Image (spheres, rainbow, N blue to C red):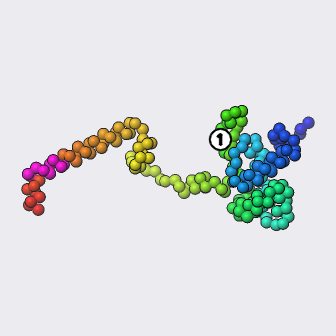
Amino acid sequence: MRHNKKNNHLGRKAAHRDAMLSNMATSLIMHKRIFTTVPKAKELRKFVEPIITKSKEDTTSSRRHVFSILQNKFAVTELFQNISQKVADRPGGYTRIIKTGYRLGDNAAMCFIELVDYNENMLGDGAAKKAKTRRSRRKGSGAAAAATEPKAAKSAAKKADEVVEEVQQSEATASDTPVAEESAAQE
């Protein structure tokens, strides 16, 4: 019976599974984001988060323990020097899984797993948003606005430009009349 045995074996023997998770953890630490299947990412999260927690305490004992798991001195150095400094005030939840869809060949569910504090796009969302006004009709300037406008908006903008040109031409012809010259001479 398999009472309370909740880990996913990923179709591998224990030694193969440990080696694979160690290699994936090293890649995650070095590259900050990796692309893998969802079951592997969920197992990697359970594998790497205790290692990152251990790296918060920079002692010889914790370095030796982490090295015995990862077997890569460059990953251990990166973990203890850079990553542990960024996650020092975070109580857990160092990784994020973002599902991306299904693989073309075998329809396996794919995802990104990344370190939370290293994604600048998600960190900068709060400050980057602009306040929108409800009454604004202007979409922007240049070719970027022209590329995003629908056809109806483009034709309406064209008609508005034609009306403005006609008004300018009528004002120009009105200034050529003698009445306008007399008023200009009086001033």
Res 88 visible:
no
* Magenta portion: prevailing SS class: helix
Residue at the spot of label 1: 100
Say left or right for 18 vs 146. Answer: right
Identify the amino acid type marked 1: Thr
Q: Residue at x 65, y 38 (%)?
A: 101
The part of the image, by quadrant, that contains residue 156 is top left
Measured as percent of width and height from the top left, residue 184 is found at: 11, 58
Measured as percent of width and height from the top left, residue 31 is found at: 69, 53
Res 143 visible:
yes
Q: Residue at x 82, y 66 (%)?
A: 59
Taking the view exactly as shown, the residue that stands out farthest to the top is: 106
Q: Residue at x 11, y 62 (%)?
A: 187
Q: Residue at x 20, y 46 (%)?
A: 169
Task: Give the extent of the magenta segment.
Answer: 171-179
Residue at disc 1, secondary structure: strand
Say left or right for 118 vs 132. Answer: right
> Is 184 covered by the magenta stretch?
no
Measured as percent of width and height from the top left, residue 138 is found at: 39, 48
Say left or right for 6 vs 171. Answer: right
